[in-house]
Amino acid sequence: MRGPFIIPLALLATSALAPWQASADAIYTYRAPDGVPMFTDRESMPSGYELLNVRRGWVERRGPLSDDLRDLYDPEIRHAARLYGIDPGLIKAVIHAESLFDRHAVSRVGAQGLMQLMPRTANFLEVNNAFDPRQNIAGGARFLNYLMERFDDLELVLAAYNAGEGNVRRYGGVPPFPETQGYVKRVQQLLPRYQQHFASPDPSLAIR
């Protein structure tokens, strides 16, 4: 198993910073002056920080979901779970909430694939093709691994995945953003089904 995924965060608390505004539904990726990518919820950063991308919002996808599509990516999920030490049920619940298992899903701001990775973030996560299920799932699992190194509560991990680590720390828990609260609730609703799914000798019996 690989070691933890380290992502330095731009959590600079100093009066020298330019004014910034926290967003309830945005995660910003900057390149620091030393070239290291940084994930934060800060809309503005000091001079020298290059904005790479912005991920905004989460809207749950609803629609028909066949058993075949739901279980199509189980081998890739199991692979990523072993690689990064993540519960496969959690990975699958996040995929369900993020893309409804649509490998070609693209959000209104360009997040791509099953786990909705922004292009430059995907590149930093060593995902060359965000529409390739194996790469996309591995990238998303890698980011979950990173968040789990920083929070020991699943609700906080999910909230950080949606709203940013800075907002979780700022509010001392799940931020009071309806979108984030809905996202955390939805993934937690799906999680037991998919944990049972991977534990069952006949996964088709575990979901319905």
Image (tube, helix red, strand yellow):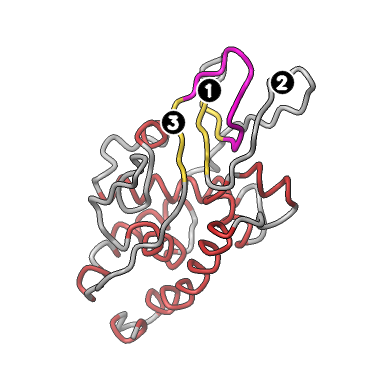
Query: Left or right of 49: which side holds 207?
Result: left
Give the image quarter of residue 95.
bottom left
Query: Left or right of 136: which side holds 30?
Result: right
- Where does the C terminus fall, quadrant-wise? bottom left
Above or below, comparing residue 34 to residue 200 in the picture:
above
In space, the residues marked 3 and 2 are separated at their CA atoms by 20 Å
Query: Left or right of 7: which side holds 109?
Result: left
The crowd level at tag 1 (other Cα within 10 Å; few <14, some 14-19, many 20+) is few
- Residue 2 drawn at (x, y percent): 48, 44
Query: Left or right of 83: which side holds 129?
Result: left
Report the magenta residues as a range. Answer: 40-51
Above or below, comparing residue 200 to residue 114 in the picture:
below
Q: Which residue is mark 1?
A: 36
Q: Which residue is mark 2?
A: 17
Considering only order in the chain, which callout, 3 or 1, is on the residue closer to the N terminus? 1
- Residue 42 drawn at (x, y percent): 61, 33
- Residue 17 drawn at (x, y percent): 71, 20
- Residue 179 drawn at (x, y percent): 53, 57
Above or below, comparing residue 207 to residue 96 in the picture:
below
Mark 2: secondary structure: loop
